[in-house]
Amino acid sequence: MLFGATTTTAAEVLAGVDLTGRRVIVTGASSGLGVATARALAGAGAQVTLAVRDVAAGEQVAAGLPGVTRVAPLDLADLRSVAAFVAAWSGPLHALVNNAGIMATPLRRTPEGRELQFAVNHLGHFALATGLHPALAAAGSARVVAVSSVGHVNAGVDLDDVDFRRRPYDPWLAYGQSKTANILFAVEAARRWAADGITANALNPGRITETRLGRHVGDIAAAPASFDPASTDVSWKDVEQGAATSVLLAGSPLVAGVTGRYFEDCQEAGPHRPGVRRGVAAYALDPEAAARLWDLSAELTGARRR
């Protein structure tokens, strides 16, 4: 792949790719990366469903997209909403882009008592993907894409305290934990669902200039010491560039059959090195941790252990 690390756009990744007849869901597609991802996939001919909390905002986005698009309500913090979305889906699903997310929120919990970042970024998407597993399997060669973050290098998943009941709550550690969970999900989904022809991969979109993800961050100084906004090893991207890796994994023939990996800048990432905001931490690819997280997530969401 010869795409530029920070200059390639989502549309350029799918130039010449025909996704006609392929059905795709993009979560969090009412703003930022989700809109750019949906636009590129729809532009390549895919039938895109925008899964959003704010249906009115989603309808506004859909009106400006090419091709066949629909909008459906989805609140990832509410497992009843996830279950309703799954129940309403019919027919095969060729790609699921788990794009929605929140970052560095104050300590908040769902009605079930789950820490909000872990609930939204991981558990809601876990319940969505496992619930849609029959639809993904029916497609024959489906893809699941988990939008993670370089923030995963700040924290692994504490399987004994995912909800910060025993340890002091830190918004950045909670975010890092949820983003590591995204990668571990892809690792275990790749193993469990390979026989169904389903691939699963995770990605870091990069630092994006035009999203609402950082709306809870009042002071960048509150970030971990390893988060250096002036760092030269990571460049800022606009949303069209940030969505490039997502659409690569969701629709490009260049990665057909690739599964259980972590990508950044439109290529598979290398190992993370301390002090550098790139690469994937070894604990995020640990198959034992991935299997344990899957079992815990199934227990917390009531999902069938497919």
Image (cartoon, grey):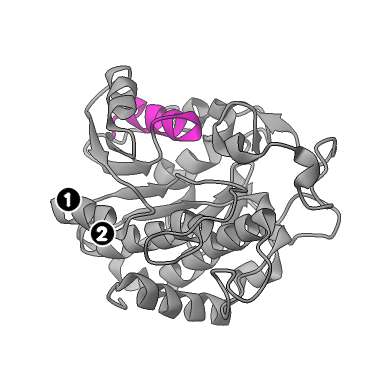
Q: Residue at x 42, y 72 (%)?
A: 297
The verdict on residue 43 being magenta is yes
Q: Is residue 84 above or below residue 156?
A: above
Precedes in sequence: disc 1 or disc 2: 1
**Residue 67, quarter of the rendered image:** top left
Q: Residues in magenta?
A: 30-46
Report the side of 162 relative to 228 (left or right).
left
From where the camera sits, is residue 146 visible? yes
**What kind of element bears circle 1?**
loop
**Residue under the point 60% across and 50% down:** 106
Tell me: residue 7, above or below residue 217.
above
Q: Quadrant of the C terminus?
A: bottom left
Crowding at mark 2 (Cα within 10 Å: few <14, some 14-19, many 20+)? many
Q: Residue furthest top?
A: 64
- The type of residue carrying mark 2 is Leu
Percent x, y for residue 53? 34, 39
Query: Residue 299: which numbered mark, if any?
Result: none
- Whether residue 1 is visible, yes or no, is no
Q: Do tag 1 and tag 2 residues touch (Cβ < 8 Å)? A: yes
185 left or right of 111?
A: right
Identity of the residue drawn at 54% across and 27% down: 240
Q: Give the residue displayed 82% in from the left and 41% down from the top.
A: 233
Image location of residue 80, percent across then percent down: 25, 58
Residue holding disc 2: 132
Percent across and percent down for residue 177 are 61, 63
Residue 53 painted magenta: no
Label 2 SS: loop
Q: Amino acid at mark 1?
A: Trp
Q: Residues within 10 Å of mark 1 (few under 14, many from 20)?
A: few
Query: Which residue does the numbered mark 1 point to in the structure image?
Result: 89
